[in-house]
Image: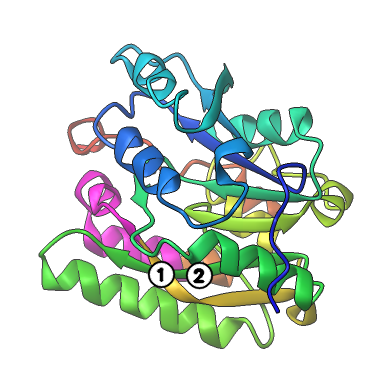
Amino acid sequence: MDVVCSPSELTIVIPAKNEAAYLPRLLDSLSRQDLPAMRSVPIFVADAGSTDGTVELAMKFADRLNVAVIPGGLPSVGRNAGARVASTPYLLFLDADIELDDDTLIRRAVRLLRRRRLHCLTTSIRCMSRNPFDHALYLANNLMQRIGSFTKPFGTGMFLLFDAAAFNRLGGFDESALFAEDYHLTRQISPRRFGILRGHILTSNRRFLRTGRLRMVFLFFRTMLNTWNDSYFANDHRYWETPSEAE
C-alpha cells in the first residue's frame, strides 16, 4: 500500500533566470501531478533577476500551486536559497526548462526515496528536440548514469530529489563551483544511498545549442575524469557563454 506524501514532507526548488518560455510549461506539468498533497507543496522559484516576466508568469500559477518567488543567483545559489527556507524532510530540485509528462513521477519518487531510505534520487532524461543526435546524447547520458550508479553516482540538477538531512550534511550545493555543481554534489553520495527512478523527464536542447553538441560531449567526459579535482569545478569552462560570446 502506498504511503502518500503530506504537505509538510516535500519542498520543490526551481532556480530561474529569464525562463518565461519554459517555466510555465514546468509549472503546468507540476499542477497535473497525482501526488495527493501537490496543491500544498511549497514551490520556490529562486529568481536571479529575470527581466522577461518570469516572476509574473510564475505567480499566475498561485491558484493551482503553492508557488512563491525568492531571490536567486547562479543555480547553486538559487537551489541553496530554496533549501534554506524549506522545512520539509525531502527536497526536490528541478531545472526550469524541463517538463514532467508522467503524472505519477513525483509521487513515485518520494515513495522510492522513503522506502529505500535513499539520500538522493534522480531519473532519466529525454529531449523535446526532434534532432536524433540530441536524443542519442541523452540516451548516452542515461546509460552512463546507470553504470555509474553502481560505483560513482552522479545526477543532474534537472531532477534531484534529496533527503534534506543528507543534503544538509553534505553542505548543499557548492556556491563556489561555477560549473557542474550538481555533479560536484552528487558524486559524494554513496552508491547504496543513490537511486534512479524508472521513468524520465523531458528537457529542451538549449544546452546543446548554446554550448555545442561536441563540446558538451567533451565537457561531460572531462568532468568525469576530474571527479575529485575540486579546482576543476571552480572554473566555468565557458559553459555560460552564448555561441557568439565564445567565438
- In the rendered structure, the answer to whether residue 91 lies left or right of residue 19 reads right
**116 or 159, nearer to the observer:** 116
- In the rendered structure, the answer to whether residue 10 lies left or right of residue 222 reads right
- In the rendered structure, the answer to whether residue 17 lies left or right of residue 88 reads left
Secondary structure, magenta segment, majority class: helix
Q: Which mark is residue 123?
A: 2
Vertical position of residue 198 compared to residue 119: above or below = below
Give the secondary structure at mark 1.
strand
The colour style of the image is rainbow
Quadrant of the image occupied by residue 185: bottom right
Residue 92: x and y in percent read 62, 50
Residue found 71% across the figure and 56% down from its top = 162
Vertical position of residue 73 compared to residue 102: above or below = above
Give the secondary structure at mark 2.
strand
- Disc tally is 2
Q: Which amino acid does label 2 sit on?
A: Thr
Vertical position of residue 104 compared to residue 99: above or below = below
Residue found 33% across the figure and 11% down from its top = 51
Q: Do the residues labelled 2 and 1 touch (CB within 8 Å)?
A: yes
- In the rendered structure, the answer to whether residue 123 lies left or right of residue 2 reads left
Q: How far apart are marks 2 and 1 (CA)?
A: 5 Å
Q: What residue type is labelled 1?
A: His
For residue 206: magenta?
yes
* Residue at image mark 1: 200
Q: Residue 212 carries which label?
A: none
The C terminus, quarter of image: top left
Residue 66: x and y in percent read 56, 30
Regarding residue 40, the answer to whether it shows in the image is yes
